[in-house]
Image: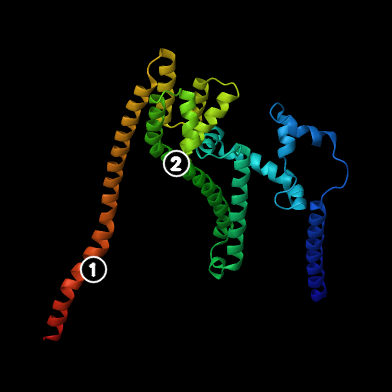
Amino acid sequence: MTAVTSALGWAVLCGTGLGVGLWSLVSLTPRLSRPRLIDRVAPYILDVSSAARAFVGRKTVDPIPVLGSLAAPMLGTLTQLLARVLGGAEAVERRLRQAGLTHTVYEFRFRQLVWALAALAAGAVFVLVAPAARSLPVALQLMAPLLAGLGGALCRDALLQRAAVRRLARMSSELPTVLEFLTLSLSAGEGILDSIRRVSASSSGELSRELGGVVTEVHTGLPLASALASMARRLDLPEVNRFADQVTGALDRGSPLAEVLRAQAQDAREQAKRGLLETAGKKEVAMLVPVVFLILPMTILFAIFPGLVVLQTGF
């Protein structure tokens, strides 16, 4: 009876897997019916209709059609619950923009939920499989998967924070070169918008990419001052905020932009030097750890060991 039940369970599991796989393959085949009117019109009104953008950008499956469709309601509820528990939507949105990602806060929370569920499953498998985990108290066995899931969610948030910090650091290092390039273009007789366009087209850094976005916004009809303010607000980097404020103030007062940007480039170079000196000081202190706890004890050991051997052997 036990063998029959076990065989029946395996048969149900294999049949379910085969059915889901075949259903997924069938759902991926192209549809031969005529396209609907909304399918033909939506791509042409993306710039004026948010519903069209949502319709064109929707994903019916991710990564498997059937499983994605079946799990979508439950995952959506869990994502909303995670967003309410963690909160901080404004901080997450700011870090997403600083990291250069186009995800929404809900999409990030969904990815964070996937990380948490994967870590939860890994923790549960570890508790069930590892012999050392079975000897732990029941409370710890129950808490281990939950702690693993919490660690997965926090790890995804830490990775986003790290990506934002690294990108802002790259922008800070690129700023002096970009300002000098803008100063050179302005001194050659170009306007500020043409100079920004030239910088964004001839370089491939993170700051140049953001300046390319400013040029795109200006071409859509947004004033240059508003586009620069939007970039500064999106990045929330003090150096970029200062650059946007000085350019906007110079445009309002009619001051020579070349002189303003040259002075800011010099200040940025000086700030970069101070940052390098601070980093070098921190690295110098960190380098003392292997010197004091590794190299120095080994040196003393090599100096004392021959004498100890001579004293012990009497030779």
- Using the image, determine if residue 140 lies above or below residue 209: below
Labelled pair 2, 1 in contact (Cβ < 8 Å) = no
Identify the image quadrant of residue 41: top right
**Residue 228 location (% of width, % of height):** 49, 25
Amino acid on which the number 1 mark rests in the picture: Met
Q: Which mark is residue 298?
A: 1
Asked whether 158 or 174 is in front, the reply is: 174
**Amino acid at dot 2:** Val
Is 292 positioned to the left or the right of 51 in the image?
Answer: left
Q: Nearer the viewer, residue 312 or 227?
A: 227
Point out which mark residue 165 bears. Answer: 2
Image-based side of 207 in relation to 308, left or right: right
Residue at the extreme right of the image, as rendered: 33
Of the 4 image quadrants, the one containing the N terminus is bottom right
Q: Is 136 left, or right, of 308 in this rendering? A: right
Q: Is residue 302 above or below residue 72?
A: below
- The 10 Å Cα crowd at callout 2, few under 14, some 14 to 19, many 20 or more, is some
Q: How is the image coloured?
A: rainbow
Q: Dot 2 lies on which element?
A: helix
Count every numbered label the image shows and give the total: 2
